[in-house]
Amino acid sequence: MIDTFNKKKCSPLAWGTGAVFGHACPTYKASKLIELLLDKGINLFDTGPSYSSGKSQKLLAKCLQSSSVNRGDILISTKIGSVPPKIPFGKTKKNFTKNSFEKLVISSLNDFKTDYLDVLFLHGLPTQEIDEEAFNYFTKLKPQGKVRFLGVAAHNKKDLEWAYRNSNNIDVVMCHYNLINHHEVEPYLLRLKEKSITIVGSTPFAGGLLSKRKKFEKLSTFKRDLFYSLKDLHPRQRRNHKKAKDILKQISIKTYSKMFPLEFSLNAKCLDITVFGSLSQQSIINSVNLLKEINHSEHLS
């Protein structure tokens, strides 16, 4: 465990709802997953009001409220800047205005029935700088006690550069980090760590590209498999597909386990926390056991 968010302990392994949680996970299964995660010591839950058209955050909130966990024992991180569509399967829009920020913050506080959020991320950044009114609203949430830590969920180098320029107002940076893109983002993340900013790595399996799990083998995983199959059609996923195939081939040749992409992220010196988003109970157990093995090896050395 690392002492990350002021004296509140946070595991190096966190769990994110991503975009598939609200679409492919019924409530009864979601509650079991959350109980398992809590039982395994995972206490940071990352979500966003735009995921699954708003369903993911509401489902996570419902499961946490129905559990026996105390609010003070968990960390909730969510986002502003991405607005959920008003129609099913509509396109998520970016809105970096004070009015939009305020609506999303109020909505998140209401969803979780809490008076504060632990971490609030700017969800990527618009092509232009955030206007002064919106940025002032964002930074004042912390002294007002509505948010404990402010962050940026960076999607590219430009986002990371912006976070560095505004590091005096930023506590946490989340960034995609995996075997495909690590060379590109590591220099930026190390610079941010020098500013005492907590770094959270996401998508260790690159949105499923680095996963060896076969799709459409079980009816119970059909919705999830369909989601990831459609996601593979995204231009960014297609660009990374060849890289992923080469990496998986190398992993097989070197007889690494199928958990190696997660192990790679957990061992990364530029990361403090790794967010994964598996909906499989066995995968969650395997992930926690991997973390224990890494911690045990570090202790022995």
Image (cartoon, rainbow, N blue to C red):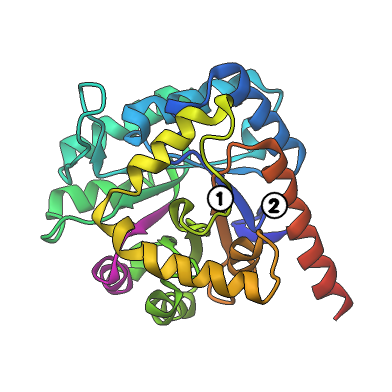
Residue 180: horizontal and vertical position, in percent?
Answer: 44, 70
What kind of residue is marked 1? Phe
Residue 292: horizontal and vertical position, in percent?
Answer: 80, 59
Asked whether 170 falls inside the magenta stretch, the response is no
Q: Quadrant of the N terminus?
A: bottom right
What mark, if any, has residue 84 been given in the picture? none
Near-viewer residue (78 or 216): 216
Near-viewer residue (154 or 120): 154
Q: Residues within 10 Å of mark 2 (few under 14, many from 20)?
A: some
Label 1, label 2: how far apart the Cα atoms are:
9 Å
Q: Are marks 1 and 2 in contact (CB under 8 Å)?
A: yes
Side (left or right) of 50 relative to 56: left
Report the residue at 31% width, 50% height from top: 123
Asked whether 160 falls inside the magenta stretch, the response is yes
Helix, strand, or loop for circle 1?
strand
Q: Residues within 10 Å of mark 1 (few under 14, many from 20)?
A: many
Instruction: Identify the residue position indicated by label 2 in the image.
Output: 287
Residue 114: horizontal and vertical position, in percent?
Answer: 49, 27
Report the residue at 30% width, 58% height from top: 238
For the question of whether residue 138 can be seen, the reply is yes
Circle nearer the N terminus (1, 2): 1
Asked where in the image residue 280 lies, by quadrant, the reply is: top right
Helix, strand, or loop for circle 2?
helix
Near-viewer residue (163 or 253): 253
What kind of residue is marked 2? Ser
Asked where in the image residue 22 lies, by quadrant, the reply is: top left
Q: Quadrant of the C terminus?
A: bottom right
Near-viewer residue (42 or 149): 42
Find the residue positioned furthest to the right. Answer: 300
What mark, if any, has residue 276 been given in the picture? 1
Report the residue at 59% width, 64% height from top: 261
Q: Which residues are magenta?
A: 150-165
